[in-house]
Image (cartoon, rainbow, N blue to C red):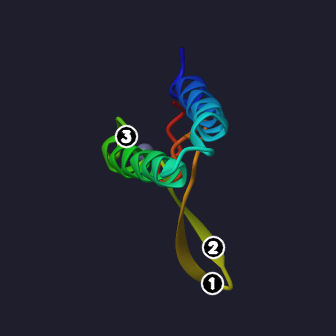
């Protein structure tokens, strides 16, 4: 199974968990805090994944992809792993 497929599944599981937990705990006294905690945990998970998932060839983070805008080199963070490395073009 490719990196991309695994990340899609992780994202779907996270989203399903978010909605299930959101509907389940929203009525509680501090339910919104639980939802915020879940969001924060998801953000921490994404940050860890963004810096640890790297291209096997050039060792750059896969989720960080360069783009050209008006002659400037800009970088953006992606949610899903691209099919090939944005830095060296290595097919994953
Ligand atoms: Zn690369």
Camera-side residue of 29 and 87: 29
Say which of marks 2 and 3 sits in front: 3
Query: Within 10 angstroms of label 1, few (less than 14), some, or many (20 or more) residues?
Result: few
Tell me: 72 left or right of 50.
Answer: right
The residues bearing labels 2 and 1 have C-alpha atoms spaced at a distance of 6 Å
**Residue 80, disc:** none
- Contact? badges 3 and 1 (CB < 8 Å): no
Could you tell me which residue is drawn at 42 percent across and 50 percent down?
A: 37
Query: Within 10 angstroms of label 3, few (less than 14), some, or many (20 or more) residues?
Result: some
Q: Under tag 3, what secondary structure?
A: loop
**Residue 53, disc:** 3
Residue behind label 2 places its C-beta within 8 angstroms of ligand 1: no
The residues bearing labels 2 and 3 have C-alpha atoms spaced at a distance of 23 Å
Say which of marks 3 and 1 sits in front: 3
Quadrant of the picture in which ligand 1 is shown? top left
Tell me: 13 left or right of 45.
Answer: right
For label 1, the residue is 71
Residue 12 seen in the current view: yes
Sooner in the amino-acid sequence: mark 2 or mark 3: 3
- Contact? badges 2 and 1 (CB < 8 Å): yes
* Image x and y of residue 81, in percent: 55, 40
Residue behind label 3 places its C-beta within 8 angstroms of ligand 1: no
Sooner in the amino-acid sequence: mark 3 or mark 1: 3
Tell me: 17 left or right of 48.
Answer: right
Camera-side residue of 64 and 33: 33
Query: Within 10 angstroms of label 2, few (less than 14), some, or many (20 or more) residues?
Result: few
For label 2, the residue is 68
* Image x and y of residue 52, in percent: 31, 43
């Amino acid at each position: 199974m490719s990196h991309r497929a695994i990340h899609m599944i992780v994202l779907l599981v996270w989203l399903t968990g978010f909605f299930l937990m959101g509907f389940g705990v929203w009525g509680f006294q501090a339910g919104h805090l639980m939802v915020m905690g879940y969001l924060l945990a998801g953000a921490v998970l994404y940050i860890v994944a963004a810096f640890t998932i790297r291209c096997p060839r050039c060792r750059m983070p896969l989720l960080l992809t360069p783009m050209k805008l008006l002659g400037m080199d800009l970088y953006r963070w992606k949610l899903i792993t691209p099919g090939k490395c944005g830095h060296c073009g290595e097919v994953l």
